[in-house]
Amino acid sequence: MYDYQASVRAIDAHWPTILPCIAGAVIGSFIYFTSAVRQARREKVYTEAFLGASVFFWHDLSFVLHFPLWFGVYNHWWFKSWTFALVGTVAFEAWLIYVIYQYGHRELWPSLSKRAFGAALVLGTLAVGAMWWVLKDLLNDELYFLSFAITAIWSAPFHTGLMCLRKSRAGQSPLRQLCMANNLVWLTFAFAQVDPYFKSPPFVAFAIAFTLWPLANIWLIRRLPPAPAAA
């Protein structure tokens, strides 16, 4: 998909404009997760769909676990910076999966015991990890450029699904939708300086569509009734 060594050289050549992109995306990510945690505790509802949280978790954890590659083989500030940042996001993502266990049992699978529901979540998380492993291999995306862009907006359709399921804005926040759009814009601007693929028609179409999707979610959030009072 892209030349690894050429991409690293391009990052160094354009670091004055790429470094702010990292900062913008990392800040947006931590605002996203902090908002999700606060809203879950306030409304007593899970704020991230299972497939959203679990794919986030495995994407970021797999990047962190590649630290010998980032610190040894590439030994480059871009990958080292992301490694440190993603240690924090992995903790948030694990917590969001736990929140599904804590608040999602009655909503998602009330016929199961709480223990069985927890076991199903653990097994499901492991299954998503296996799926992620296969998909990551198929992407031929060793440096995680494309997967960063995909996971930046991965949960947008799942937020739409939760609103359709609940018929309310429970667990939803315009701020988090803006964070998703923000992150994709920053990452697109960064990667477009690194490799021509990120200026190609397929990627540009993807970037436009999934910058607009979170904005459409905001439109929907503002038209739905508020979350029911937490018990």
Image (cartoon, helix red, strand yellow):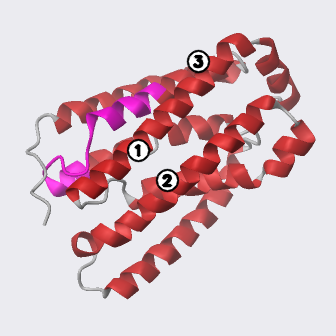
Q: Is residue 210 left or right of residue 60?
A: left
Q: Does label 2 or label 1 sit earlier along the sequence?
A: 1
* Closest to the observer, 115 or 88: 88
Where does the image place residue 140, in percent across and percent down from the top left? 74, 43
The residue at 76%/38% (across/down) is: 80
**Three-letter amino acid code at disc 1?**
Thr
- The residue carrying pointer 3 sits among few (fewer than 14), some (14 to 19) or many (20 or more) residues within 10 Å by Cα, namely some
- Residue type at mark 3? Phe
**Res 92 label:** 2
Give the label on residue 213, or none: none
**Relative to 17, does residue 101 appear above or below in the rendering?**
below
Residue 143 point in image, percent of width and height: 75, 38
**Residue 203 visible from this viewpoint:** no
Is the C-beta separation of discs 3 and 2 under 8 Å?
no
Q: Which residue is mark 3?
A: 189
**Is residue 178 in view from this perspective?**
yes
